[in-house]
Image (spheres, rainbow, N blue to C red):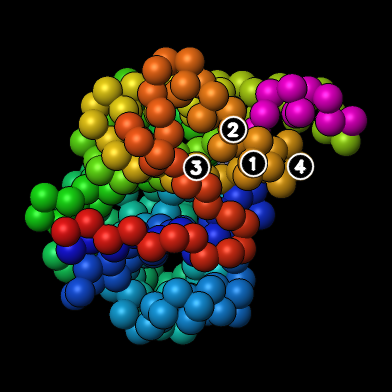
Amino acid sequence: MLKIQTLSSGSAGNITYIGTDNTGILVDVGLPLSATLKLMSQANIDPHSINGIVITHEHSDHIKGVADYVSHYEVPIYCYHSSTNTLKRCLKLPPHYFHETDNSFTIGDITVNSFPVPHDSNFCLGYTFQNGNSTVGIATDIGQMTETIFTNLATCQVVILESNHDVQKLMANPKYPDWLKRRILGNRGHLSNIDCGRTIAKLYQANVAQVILAHLSEKNNTPTLAYQTVKQYLQSQNITEGKDIFIDVALQSQIGNCYCLE
Ligand SMILES: [Zn+2]
Ligand SMILES: [Zn+2]
């Protein structure tokens, strides 16, 4: 049995829980410790049940609470070897917290695979988590969809996928300077709602059953806009949301629905 639940998702802080009866993993701790513990308690997750933390990349909306969490609960950070130096520098933790890995490793009874994601950080990783016949995948902060990301997500039953912004809303946002718009839209920035929709149409062909839209911008998107854009694109490809594939939206600083895969 594999359990997956977003605890917070968006440009202001990301935390996802992946677990079995015996193992608990957090993907990123992008909120302060107190806010993280509050969300975990709402989701009935015992903070002592976490066996490891994996990190997508070093931006603060993904690592803000990591150092406090691991030093409070004595949890190792499992980090891909090429990400270790960046994480050591950013987190300023004693070396024994860093457990260096290859791109495939196990935490308890969960097999973890990481894969590269193009983004404007020193490193950026997506992950799949497998227990028995169940696999879930997570990929956010995606400048552009790649064959590698797609191939990894296509093996999953449940996928957490970035749906960061509405392109028109971003372009019309007077508070965002041109350089920032170019950064977000660039091929090391973030995935738009429409590109997310295009990817989901292909994931449907690969038999993915459930997608959770994630890492929504608070300024250039809304949960309804992300959902509607994806739903309408799927409809244009004769794929019906709620019948052929299910779409959920993860929210900022709110726990999401819990999915259990047998
Ligand atoms: Zn980022
Ligand atoms: Zn981010």
Secondary structure of the residue carrying tag 4 is loop
Badge 1 crowding class, 10 Å Cα cut-off, few under 14, some 14 to 19, many 20 or more, is few
Q: Which mark is residue 219?
A: 4
For disc 2, the marked residue is 228
Q: Which residues are magenta?
A: 165-174
- N-terminal-most mark, 3 or 2: 3
Q: Real-space Cα distance between discs 2 and 4?
A: 17 Å
- N-terminal-most mark, 3 or 4: 3
Q: Nearer the viewer, residue 146 or 233?
A: 233
Secondary structure of the residue carrying tag 3 is strand
Q: Is mark 3 within 8 Å of ligand 2?
A: no
Secondary structure of the residue carrying tag 2 is helix
The answer to whether the residue labelled 1 contacts the one labelled 4, judged by CB atoms less than 8 Å apart, is no
Q: Real-space Cα distance between discs 1 and 4?
A: 13 Å
Q: Real-space Cα distance between discs 3 and 4?
A: 16 Å
Q: Real-space Cα distance between discs 1 and 3?
A: 11 Å
Q: Real-space Cα distance between discs 3 and 2?
A: 11 Å
- N-terminal-most mark, 1 or 3: 3
The answer to whether residue 138 is seen in the rendering is yes
The answer to whether the residue labelled 1 contacts the one labelled 2, judged by CB atoms less than 8 Å apart, is yes
Q: Identify the amino acid type marked 4.
A: Lys
Query: Could you tell me which residue is drawn at 64 percent across and 41 percent down?
Result: 224
Secondary structure of the residue carrying tag 1 is helix
Instruction: Name which quarter of the figure residue 48 lies in.
Output: bottom left
Q: Quadrant of the N terminus?
A: bottom left
| Residue 261: percent from left, percent from top | 22, 56
Q: Which mark is residue 224?
A: 1
Q: Identify the amino acid type marked 2.
A: Gln
Q: Identify the amino acid type marked 1.
A: Thr
Q: Which mark is residue 52?
A: none
For disc 3, the marked residue is 213
